Image (spheres, grey):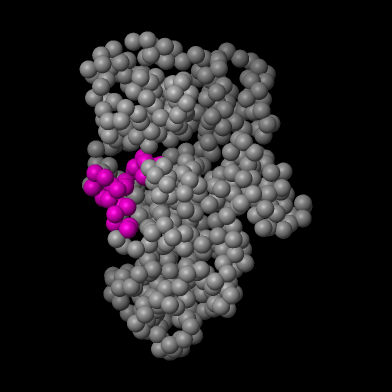
């Protein structure tokens, strides 16, 4: 089983060590941290990359200085630089020179507090995996400025300088289908992690990836897909890893532990002690292995994954989100939109413009990305990613076309599913008090009461255990959807499809 973890040989075989930048405060303080030697060279000199999956590198400009920058380029724009008076191997050997850094007002001056010291290169398999990412980007032509500009124009096809998750997903799907990118880069859980990481950690916290964040997005897409490969290989078939799966897979990951150590390590990942680990928790575990001393704020993207989209734009800006507002959702609002959809489905003249908007390329089929784009831009009430995924899967399953597309003839069914599963998710999310995307028995009973199910305490407990097939004490949204659908036939589905 190929896990994708390999040793960085080129750098270490030359005896190149790591570097530790410390002491920077205020503006650009994120340059602090450990930088590992990279597989590749830059300007025929060694270069280093921050352990964290972010755009921060130390390299030589080929002129007379070392720089710390977010891109491996000519160093004309950087976070800090130092004159190369040693003419030697790396900046840790230079004496009598300070790093030149900007202060909080943007004025550049020598900063005596910033130091650069050598450290041994890491032998952790996941750190070494991180160091391989830039080389893979280079192999696919995703490093030079011209190629990046061309790819950004393809991604930002409407030219508004920001892109949504739907647009990112569309780009990845098309590049993989066109055999331009390898198939292992098209995994939805990994893409969601990459998107969240980019907007919440590498970006400025809104719901869009901006042009300046594009390089960070590409790194994250590669990184989280690498992690998904490993997670998926460990997992059986339910997108969760239990203790036995984790312990069996340690050797394949190159991690040698005794059974006692392996179970202790698993308990560190299983933060809620439910006996299972989700992909988002696995990502947090790897982050701590790669950057154990990093600021806890680094995990904002991990928290967002377990908070079920609770992050919202804090203020309405002037960008593409200027037409979107955050309103309180309720069942009555879903009922109002359902009435609108039903009315629309009775008149094809009203229904056609909505289909044409979603099927903007006119090929009579739409992808999950195009469905997501419609929800984001026109129906924010329906913009819940887990619900969109369920609605999409339910529609293609009933479409009898044996492909991954929603066809025009299934459009009414899709609208009904969007309403139905978003209602279920709204209920699920309101019951999920700790926002971990999992229902406890108490939260499940609350949902049953809201659905009008008349059950005794013992009956509700029995139903919960029936849904919780592995006895972990929690149920996921997919399991909740399957259970509710089995008990309550979605009446609206018949009304939508028979009109």
Q: Main secondary structure of the magenta part?
A: helix
Viewer-closest of 47 and 290: 47
Q: Quadrant of the C terminus?
A: top left
Viewer-closest of 490 and 142: 142
Residue 440 image point, x, y percent:
60, 31
Q: Is residue 360 above or below residue 318?
A: above
Which residue is at a point 28% across and 74% down the rendered structure image?
Answer: 107
Asked if one can make out residue 328 in the rendered structure from this viewpoint, the answer is no
Which residue is at a point 45% across and 73% down the rendered structure image?
Answer: 41
Asked if one can make out residue 309 in the rendered structure from this viewpoint, the answer is yes
Was residue 417 drawn as part of the magenta stretch in this picture?
no
Q: Is residue 85 above or below residue 395?
A: below
How many discs mark residues in the rendered view?
A: 0
Residue 393 image point, x, y percent:
47, 28
Residue 150 image point, x, y percent:
29, 54
Viewer-closest of 418 and 251: 251
Q: Quadrant of residue 329?
A: top left
Which residue is at a point 55% across and 23% down the rendered structure image?
Answer: 482
User: Viewed as shown, does residue 192 lie left or right of 110?
Assistant: right
Span colored in magenta:
147-173
Q: Quadrant of residue 491?
A: top left
User: Viewed as shown, does residue 208 lie left or right of 179?
Assistant: left
Residue most extreme to the front: 179
Residue 277 image point, x, y percent:
62, 43
Was residue 166 drawn as part of the magenta stretch in this picture?
yes
Which residue is at a point 50% across and 28% down the rendered structure image?
Answer: 428
């Amino acid at each position: 089983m190929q896990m994708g973890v390999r040793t960085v040989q080129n750098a270490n075989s030359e005896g190149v060590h790591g570097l530790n930048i410390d002491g920077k405060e205020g503006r650009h303080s994120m340059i602090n941290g450990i930088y590992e030697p990279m597989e590749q060279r830059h300007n025929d000199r060694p270069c280093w990359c921050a352990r964290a999956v972010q755009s921060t590198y130390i390299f030589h400009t080929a002129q007379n200085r070392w720089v710390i920058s977010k891109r491996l380029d000519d160093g004309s724009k950087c976070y800090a630089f130092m004159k190369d008076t040693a003419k030697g191997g790396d900046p840790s050997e230079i004496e009598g020179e300070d790093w030149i850094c900007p202060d909080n007002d943007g004025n550049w001056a020598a900063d005596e507090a910033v130091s650069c010291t050598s450290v041994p290169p890491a032998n952790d398999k996941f750190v070494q995996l991180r160091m391989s990412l830039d080389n893979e980007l280079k192999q696919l032509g995703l490093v030079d400025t011209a190629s990046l500009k061309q790819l950004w124009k393809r991604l930002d096809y409407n030219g508004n300088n920001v892109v949504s998750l739907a647009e990112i997903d569309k780009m990845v799907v098309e590049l993989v289908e066109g055999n331009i990118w390898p198939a292992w880069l098209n995994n939805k859980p990994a893409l969601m992690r990459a998107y969240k990481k980019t907007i919440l950690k590498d970006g400025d916290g809104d719901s869009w990836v901006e042009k300046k964040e594009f390089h960070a997005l590409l790194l994250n897409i590669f990184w989280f897909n690498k992690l998904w490969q490993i997670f998926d290989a460990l997992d059986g078939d339910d997108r969760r890893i239990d203790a036995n799966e984790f312990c069996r897979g340690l050797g394949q990951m190159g991690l040698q532990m005794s059974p006692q150590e392996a179970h202790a390590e698993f308990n560190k990942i299983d933060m809620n002690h439910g006996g299972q680990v989700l992909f988002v928790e696995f990502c947090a575990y790897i982050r701590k292995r790669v950057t154990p001393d990093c600021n806890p704020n680094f995990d904002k993207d991990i928290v967002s994954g377990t908070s079920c989209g609770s992050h919202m734009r804090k203020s309405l800006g002037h960008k593409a989100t200027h037409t979107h507002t955050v309103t309180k959702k309720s069942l009555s609002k879903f009922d109002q939109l359902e009435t609108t959809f039903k009315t629309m489905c009775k008149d094809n003249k009203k229904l056609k413009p909505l289909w044409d908007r979603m099927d903007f390329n006119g090929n009579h089929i739409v992808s999950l990305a195009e469905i997501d784009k419609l929800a984001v831009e026109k129906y924010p009430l329906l913009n819940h990613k887990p619900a969109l995924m369920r609605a999409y899967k339910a529609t293609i399953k009933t479409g009898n076309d044996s492909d991954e597309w929603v066809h025009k003839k299934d459009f009414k069914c899709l609208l009904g599913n969007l309403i139905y599963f978003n209602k279920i998710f709204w209920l699920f999310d309101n019951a999920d008090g700790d926002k971990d995307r999992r229902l406890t028995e108490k939260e499940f009973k609350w949902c049953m009461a809201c659905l009008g199910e008349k059950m005794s305490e013992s009956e509700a407990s029995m139903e919960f255990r029936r849904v919780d097939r592995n006895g972990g004490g929690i149920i996921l949204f997919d399991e909740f959807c399957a259970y509710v659908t089995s008990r309550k036939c979605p009446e609206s589905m018949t009304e939508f499809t028979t009109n």
